[in-house]
Image (spheres, helix red, strand yellow):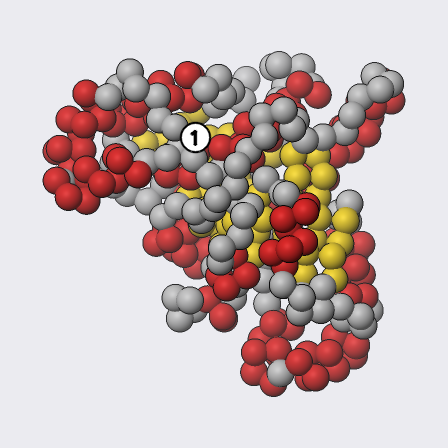
Amino acid sequence: MPYDLKNRLVVGIASSALFDLTESNKVFETKGEEAYRHYQEANLEVPLAEGKAFPFVSRLLSLNDLRPEDDPLVEVIILSRNDPDTGLRVMRSIAHHELAITRAIFSQGRAPYQFMPPLNMSLFLSADDRDVRAAVDMKLPAGRVLDTAFTDDPNDKDLRIAFDFDGVLADDVSDQVWEKEGLPAFKGHEVANMVTPHGEGPLKDFLASLNAIQKREEQYSIECPGYHRRLRISVVTARNAPTHERAVTSLKRWGVTVNEAFFLGGIEKAGVLDVLRPHIFFDDKPENLAELHVPGVHVPFGVINKSGG
């Protein structure tokens, strides 16, 4: 029987998002591919340091203790432009950090995101803007992990995930109204369409998969009284009343849920996120991710991202 990925949350991640490749990339950019190959071979036994998405990935994989080992809730698969030889250091580093990642695709300079559909991936994370934009152009759910000053607390076992709404969970149709006609037109459009759910955005299915894990947590807490539920999901959006109602309606009609919603009405998100401290926050607008103290992911979806901004 082949291993079935259909009923699991599958995340693809580039080594550039999982590990700190600053020194490796410097060698590649200044000395070329052959020097990079020698560098990785010479440092094969030197584990790569944790990257910006490491806290998110390690906590996500830890949720596999909710089901038997041979039937995990979560699969994380490496999607890398490395070839198998240079990718060996990545796999050694995964073993060093005791991450339960056993599957990888090394494609020697070719974009690996094209393998997302057959692997049932609902998310691809990379630090490579080119790969992420190309994946999104193919209507694949992808995001670019940005640099951050976030310091992980290893004693904190929870996993907190936060999403912007428009252009991330929902499509960008309403955002287009805002961009073209301004805030009053946006509010009028949302009130007029209050009972009509938005079209689904690139990460709606990822949220649905997270909800499935939360349902397993709920069941597990019944089986094991005293279990502390670890996965918490938030929406942090610039919407406020009355436009908040259509967002709530959309989530309900899609059959997905969040634990918290912050309707900020133009207040800067950074302060709220500093208190919330998500291990990952997804937003389609780069300006909302600038200088955050939490791991931010740019989802380059919709018209506002077509010009490269």
Tell me if I can see residue 242 in this picture: yes
Q: Residue at x 63, y 59 (%)?
A: 269
The correct choice, above or below, for 188 with respect to 16 in the image is: below
Q: Residue 157 versus residue 134: which sits nearer the camera?
A: 157
Task: Give the quarter of the image for residue 107.
Answer: top left
State how many labels appear. 1
**In the drawing, does residue 65 fall left or right of residue 223?**
left
The correct choice, above or below, for 244 with respect to 218 in the image is: below
The percent coordinates of residue 290 (x first, y second) are: 49, 58
Q: Residue at x 58, y 75 (%)?
A: 176
Which quadrant, please, contains the N terminus?
top right
Q: Which residue is mark 1?
A: 50
Circle 1 SS class:
loop
The percent coordinates of residue 117 (x first, y second) are: 49, 42
- Residue type, label 1: Glu
**In the drawing, does residue 149 fall left or right of residue 254?**
left
Tell me if mark 1 has few (under 14), some (14-19) or many (20+) residues whose alpha carbon lies within 10 angstroms of its own.
Answer: some
Task: Give the quarter of the image for residue 34.
Answer: top left
Q: Residue 156 versus residue 306: which sits nearer the camera?
A: 156
The percent coordinates of residue 208 (x first, y second) are: 69, 44
Q: Residue at x 20, y 22 (%)?
A: 41
The percent coordinates of residue 27 (x first, y second) are: 19, 37
Which quadrant, please, contains the C terminus?
bottom left
Tell me if I can see residue 165 in this picture: no
